[in-house]
Structures are given as structure tokens and as C-alpha cells.
Image (tube, rainbow, N blue to C red):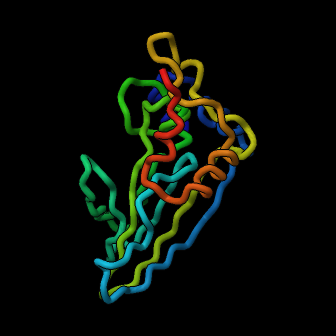
Amino acid sequence: MKVLSLNLGLKEEKFQDAFGGENIGACLRVNYYPKCPRPELALGLSSHSDPGGMTILLPDDQVFGLQVRKNDMWITVKPHPHAFIVNIGDQIQNYNLCVCHDKMQILSNSAYKSVEHRVIVNSEKERVSLAFFYNPKSDIPIQPLQELVSTHNPPLYPPMTFDQYRLFIRTQGPQGKSHVESHVSPR
């Protein structure tokens, strides 16, 4: 979080404070994907971006399964042994600034973009991964940081708590990155 703040020219504690200081939400999930005789007919997890702040993934480096979307194409991630994969989530996307699109989106007002990804299954081997989700405190409003907005770069996202955002996603179901993109404020 410090590096993300400093990279945008902010004080190093800015993102952490916006997430609720030390009172953040966190969750560790073990993902098990059994082998599937017809993988072309199944997905391990459909296309989505992570709704929280950041996801730290310890993948199975022997059985590939994570894919990211880039330029409308799915690219299989080939992890290095003993390495983590870090995904930026929707809440950081919304805090930034930029007229570009695709990073830690809400806090950054889209200077950072959340990563659209999915999981595929393997026909011959099962796979296990560990995902640590680092999320903002659930009841504080998340919105673009004031330091990152101006008359030339207005806020792209309205204030919304993480609980409100999660409820919205759960009622809509997984739909790629359409959840975060549907909250962009009209200019």
C-alpha cells in the first residue's frame, strides 16, 4: 500500500488510511480445482475483477489455471516457483487519477486498474491455490482521493462503502469488469 501511494506522489500512508488504517478486512481462501475430463466445457471461476483492494495469490506453479484478459484476449499466467501473484482490486482502482484506464481503480480514480481474470480447469491434474484478500474496512466510504481529482480530472466514481459494493456484485453475479465500470459517474 505504501508503494502504491508513493507511486502516485502521495504520502506513504494515504492508501492505508483510506482503507481504514489498521482496521482493514482480510480473508484467506483455499481454492481447489479438481481435474475435469472436458475442461473446454467448464470454468474453475468465471471472468471477474476482485472487488476488494488487493489479492495476493500463491498459485500452483505446476498446473496453470489463472488467465488474465489483455486486449480482449485471455492469456495464461505462468507463475514462477515460490512467487506470489498480486492483483489490484476494484477498490484501489476507484481511488486514483488519470484519464487512462486499467489499475487499482476506485481509490486511484482509475490510475491503477483492477485485473479482469478467470480460472480454467485441467483435464489431467487437480490444482490448489491460496488467495489472500486485502480489503478496506467494510463501512467507510470509498471514493477517489481528493489529491487525485481536479477540474480537469473529476472523480470517476461516487462514494460507496465496501459492503454496499459487495452487495451490488452479489446481486448481479460475476460479469467481468462490468461491475466497477457501471459505477463510473457521468461527466
Q: Is residue 7 left or right of residue 40?
A: right
Q: Residue at x 43, y 59 (%)?
A: 84
Camera-nearest residue between 136 and 82: 136
Give the tally of numbered discs.
Answer: 0
Camera-nearest residue between 84 and 173: 173
In the picture as drawn, the residue positioned furthest to the top comes out as: 151
Camera-nearest residue between 163 and 57: 163
Q: Compared to 145, does 56 lie above or below? A: below
Q: Compared to 100, does 16 lie above or below? A: below
Give percent across and percent down for residue 25.
Answer: 68, 51
Give percent across and percent down for residue 67.
Answer: 33, 62
Give percent across and percent down for residue 152.
Answer: 44, 12
Q: Compared to 6, does 180 lie above or below? A: below
Q: Residue at x 43, y 36 (%)?
A: 112
Q: Is residue 20 left or right of residue 135?
A: right
Give percent across and percent down for residue 3.
Answer: 49, 36
